[in-house]
Image (tube, rainbow, N blue to C red):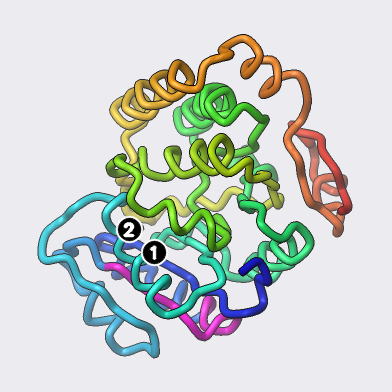
């Protein structure tokens, strides 16, 4: 099942996103009719707002972490016959208008994982987050055995084969790294990045991602996977000797003030 137009689902994990969730979902629904929202134990009005919209709502009575929220969404999408899933965070950081670009890349590269990579307007990203993300890219690319742009992005297209990795034993933010590494290594799945803008609202709620704690957990997991797969030096060279694969037919990177990563602008 590699046709991204067959029946894509959008999965939105959220926790206390009452300020942003309605606008986000209304934007998503303009591009995709199959939307699953996982409320991971919110204590604000998030669930009530979501319940007013034509989406599927899964509620966790208490917080279980992003990994469990994504698992719940993946399992529901698989039950419903999804050809793949597009994940987006519930805080409004991801622009629903990028959905057609990511799905177009999925059609152009059937069977590949597509990452909405925050390569545009990087000056908007807080310095601490940018440094943490750069370090994660360095390490997780090594774990994948291939260069990957923006390994921490939550806006991703997972083809059906990647969604079936739902049972991987990894929790919270480590889960996204685990799927990226397993898909790359075990399935030899290509990873293609689509440039998107960094969107940070100064009025948004504080991020649930903790750079020190979560990067440490992701790092320990990744080191374990690098050792597990072996050929450590070969994997390092394969992941750092060239640029990541980038799909940018609109040449948005060319129009940006700076392009920190280079890649294929077409197919």
Name the quadrant containing residue 76: bottom left
Residue assigned mark 1: 74
The question of residue 33 being in magenta is answered with yes
Measured as percent of width and height from the top left, residue 252 is found at 81, 52
Q: Nearer the viewer, residue 3 or 39?
A: 3
Is 123 displayed left or right of 90 in the figure? right
Disc 1: CA contacts within 10 A as few (<14), some (14-19) or many (>=20): many
Name the quadrant containing residue 257: top right
Residue assigned mark 2: 71
Q: Residue at x 11, y 66 (%)?
A: 61
Are the residues tagged 1 and 2 within 8 Å (C-beta)?
yes
The question of residue 58 being in magenta is answered with no
Q: Is residue 182 above or below residue 238?
A: below
Measured as percent of width and height from the top left, residue 229 is found at 50, 22
Q: Provide the residue span drawn in magenta.
A: 27-38
Q: Residue at x 59, y 48 (%)?
A: 198
Is 214 displayed left or right of 113 in the figure? left
Disc 2: CA contacts within 10 A as few (<14), some (14-19) or many (>=20): many
Q: Separation of disc 1 and disc 2 at Cα? A: 5 Å
Q: Is residue 260 above or below residue 22?
A: above
């Amino acid at each position: 099942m590699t046709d991204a137009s067959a029946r894509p689902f959008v999965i939105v994990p959220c926790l206390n996103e009452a300020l942003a969730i309605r606008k986000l979902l209304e934007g998503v629904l303009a591009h995709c009719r199959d939307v699953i929202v996982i409320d991971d134990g919110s204590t604000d009005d998030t669930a009530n707002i979501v319940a007013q919209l034509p989406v599927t709502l899964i509620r966790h009575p208490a917080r279980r972490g992003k990994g469990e929220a994504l698992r719940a969404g993946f399992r529901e999408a698989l039950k419903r016959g999804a050809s793949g899933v597009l994940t987006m965070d519930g805080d409004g950081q991801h622009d629903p208008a990028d959905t057609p670009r990511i799905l177009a890349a999925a059609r152009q590269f059937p069977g590949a994982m597509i990452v909405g990579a925050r390569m545009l307007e990087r000056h908007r990203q807080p310095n601490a987050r940018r440094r943490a993300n750069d370090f994660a890219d360095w390490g997780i690319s090594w774990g994948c055995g291939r260069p990957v742009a923006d390994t921490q992005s939550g806006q991703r297209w997972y083809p059906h084969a990647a969604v079936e990795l739902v049972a991987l034993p990894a929790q919270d933010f480590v889960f996204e790294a685990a799927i990226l590494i397993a898909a790359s290594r075990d399935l030899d799945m290509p990873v293609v990045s689509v440039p998107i803008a960094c969107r940070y609202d100064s009025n948004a709620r504080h991020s649930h991602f903790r750079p020190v704690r979560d990067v440490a957990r992701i790092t320990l997991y990744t080191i374990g996977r690098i050792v597990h797969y072996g050929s450590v030096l070969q994997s390092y060279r394969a992941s750092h000797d060239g640029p990541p694969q980038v799909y940018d037919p609109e040449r948005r990177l060319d129009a940006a003030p700076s392009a920190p990563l280079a890649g294929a602008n077409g197919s």
